[in-house]
């Protein structure tokens, strides 16, 4: 009967507009929810098979809810380094627990990047979801996998403690005065065939002017080099120079200060690490051909053995009490800024540049556009921890929303594709930002008014149909 169908059409209008009101209410309630995507109720007609010819039977209306997941929200600047926004497509991969993940544990996808460090060091957002990424391996590399979720793990920024880097390279910029007077200790006085200076028995490393009977040979020039050992401990090496009676040649010794830091092998003494000659060309530049301070003048490296090993003849090791690893030091006297020269000006150390750092504590965590999570230490060292993983979908609007402003995979969304940020169509990470809600209050309030009017109109259909039905019943009376 047409009157009944009209009444049912009114009921469908009430139901559809109730759904529209619920969607609008959800939008307004989440206007400040990070990365919230607005919902909308789409209306479609319902046509019955009897709505033909002279008789018309009303079908009504049906409301279908749709969420605009793919719509990009505005990125807003924050003061937290672990707040992350996504510029472009893609979602953060998250889990509801941090540890002990298995293949059966649900992976949720979200753009709500309000992450902070929990009491165990994991990055967790305000909904309690843990951020997933690829961890750095033992070689310091990150191997991404575009399909295997099991390769992901919760990113923990507390798993890395303090750090120290040993010194491996030293660059010197210094000058030795070419007109330096040759000391008596370096002069060969006939009938002697060698000078009083001897690196084994009467060396610069033995020099002690405070002794009752002064011992050793006073260097003409000394420069000190601060270095870091494998534990980040501060050590000092000194290079002593003594002008030789042979033109353009200087005796040189590399030694530890204090000497007790070093155990010497046969041929070395009193903390010496290396001894030999440093030669110069007539133009005042380093003469690598006649320089004997290093075993290979073209590759000027000194090796110091670990505290656990006894030094070989002509070698040196760190003292057992230090408990540090061995290290090789490349001492650049030639290709550095200025290098080591011999000009007729004051002997001076202009610059000593070393790498390596003393022990440092973790002070900050930074995340860059490519999703690399980096630990920053107070000694200036930075170290990568992990890389944030991102997931993309063929149809992100087909994802199923769950509590916590996150989504699950559905048949409509298609399967996920794991990607590094900024690659393969995935958006880039925007650190120190959060994505705003896509809700526009002016549009929602306008929709609220029209929905209210439509609901009232649908209720009017029911009351009108009821009055017509009452008139029909009154005919019998």
Image: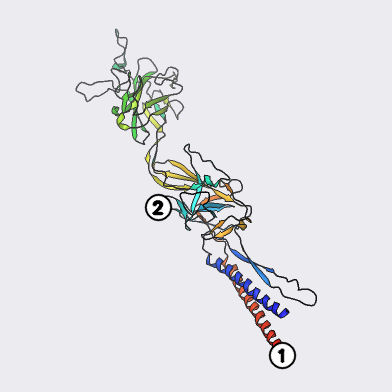
Q: Is residue 472 above or below residue 430?
A: below
Say which mark, if any, is on residue 401.
none
Label 2 crowd (10 A; few <14 / some 14-19 / many >=20): few
Specify whether residue 253 is in view: no
Q: What element carries label 2?
A: loop
Residue placed most toward the observer, 92 or 201? 92
Q: Nearer the viewer, mark 1 or mark 2?
A: 1
**The C terminus lies in quadrant:** bottom right
Q: Which residue is depicted at the point 70% across and 77% down? A: 5
Q: Is residue 50 above or below residue 253?
A: below
Q: In this view, does 336 lie above or below 191?
A: below
The reply, left or right, for residue 261 in relation to residue 113 is left
Name the residue tied to disc 2.
119
Q: Is mark 1 on a helix, strand or loop?
A: helix
Residue placed most toward the observer, 419 or 467? 467
Q: Position of residue 407 (x, y in %)?
A: 56, 57
Name the residue tied to disc 1.
476
Specify whether residue 155 is in view: yes
Q: Where is residue 79 in the image (x, y as percent from the top left)?
A: 46, 55
Of callouts 1 and 2, which one flags the residue occurring earlier in the amino acid sequence?
2
Q: Which residue is depicted at the point 28% across and 28% down? A: 260
Q: Where is residue 66 in the image (x, y as percent from the top left)?
A: 62, 63
* Residue located farthest toward the left when viewing the structure as drawn: 212
* Residue located farthest toward the front when viewing the structure as drawn: 476
**The N terminus lies in quadrant:** bottom right
Query: How many numbered circles are shown?
Result: 2
Q: Position of residue 74 (x, y in %)?
A: 56, 58
Label 1 crowd (10 A; few <14 / some 14-19 / many >=20): few
* Distance from Cα at disc 1 to Cα at disc 2: 79 Å
Q: Quadrant of residue 296?
A: top left
Q: In this view, does 37 lie above or below 189?
A: below
């Amino acid at each position: 009967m047409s009157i009944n169908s009209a009444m049912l059409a009114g009921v469908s209008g009430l139901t559809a507009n109730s759904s529209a009101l619920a969607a609008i209410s959800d939008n307004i309630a989440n206007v400040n929810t990070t990365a919230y995507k607005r919902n909308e109720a789409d209306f479609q007609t319902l046509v019955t098979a009897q709505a033909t010819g002279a008789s018309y039977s009303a079908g009504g209306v049906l409301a279908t809810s749709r969420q605009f997941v793919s719509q990009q929200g505005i990125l807003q600047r924050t003061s937290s380094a672990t707040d992350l926004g996504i510029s472009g497509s893609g979602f953060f991969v998250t889990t509801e627990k941090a540890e002990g993940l298995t293949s059966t544990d649900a992976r949720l996808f979200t753009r709500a990047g309000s992450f902070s460090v929990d009491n165990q060091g994991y990055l967790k957002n305000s909904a309690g979801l843990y951020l997933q990424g690829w961890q750095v391996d033992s070689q310091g590399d990150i191997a991404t996998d575009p399909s295997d979720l099991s390769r992901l793990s919760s990113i923990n920024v507390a798993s890395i403690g303090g750090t120290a880097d040993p010194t491996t390279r030293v660059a010197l910029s210094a000058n030795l005065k070419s007109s330096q007077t040759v000391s008596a200790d370096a002069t060969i006085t006939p009938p002697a065939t060698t000078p009083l200076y001897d690196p084994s028995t009467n060396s610069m490393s033995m020099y002690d002017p405070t002794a009752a009977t002064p011992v050793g040979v006073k260097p003409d020039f000394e420069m000190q080099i601060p270095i870091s050992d494998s534990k980040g401990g501060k050590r000092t090496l000194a290079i002593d120079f003594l002008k030789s009676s042979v033109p353009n040649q200087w005796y040189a010794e590399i030694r530890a200060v204090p000497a007790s830091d070093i155990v010497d092998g046969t041929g070395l003494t009193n903390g010496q690490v290396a001894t030999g000659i440093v030669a110069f060309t007539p133009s005042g530049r380093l003469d690598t051909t006649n320089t004997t301070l290093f075993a290979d003048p073209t590759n000027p490296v000194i090796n110091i053995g670990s505290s656990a090993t006894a030094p070989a003849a002509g070698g040196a090791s760190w003292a057992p009490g230090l408990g540090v690893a061995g290290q090789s030091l490349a001492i650049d006297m030639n290709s550095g800024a200025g290098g080591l020269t011999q000009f007729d000006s004051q002997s001076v150390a202009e610059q000593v540049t070393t790498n390596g750092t003393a022990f440092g504590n973790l002070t900050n965590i930074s995340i860059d556009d490519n999703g690399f999570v980096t630990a920053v230490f107070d000694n200036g060292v930075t170290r990568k921890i992990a890389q944030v993983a991102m997931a993309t979908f063929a149809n992100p609007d087909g994802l199923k929303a769950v509590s916590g402003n996150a989504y699950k995979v559905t048949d409509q969304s298609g399967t996920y594709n794991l990607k590094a940020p900024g690659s393969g169509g995935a958006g880039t990470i925007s650190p120190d930002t959060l994505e705003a809600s896509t809700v526009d209050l002016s549009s929602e309030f306008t929709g609220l008014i029209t929905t209210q009017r439509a609901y009232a109109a649908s209720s009017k259909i029911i009351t009108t149909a009821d009055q017509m039905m009452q008139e029909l019943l009154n005919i019998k009376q």
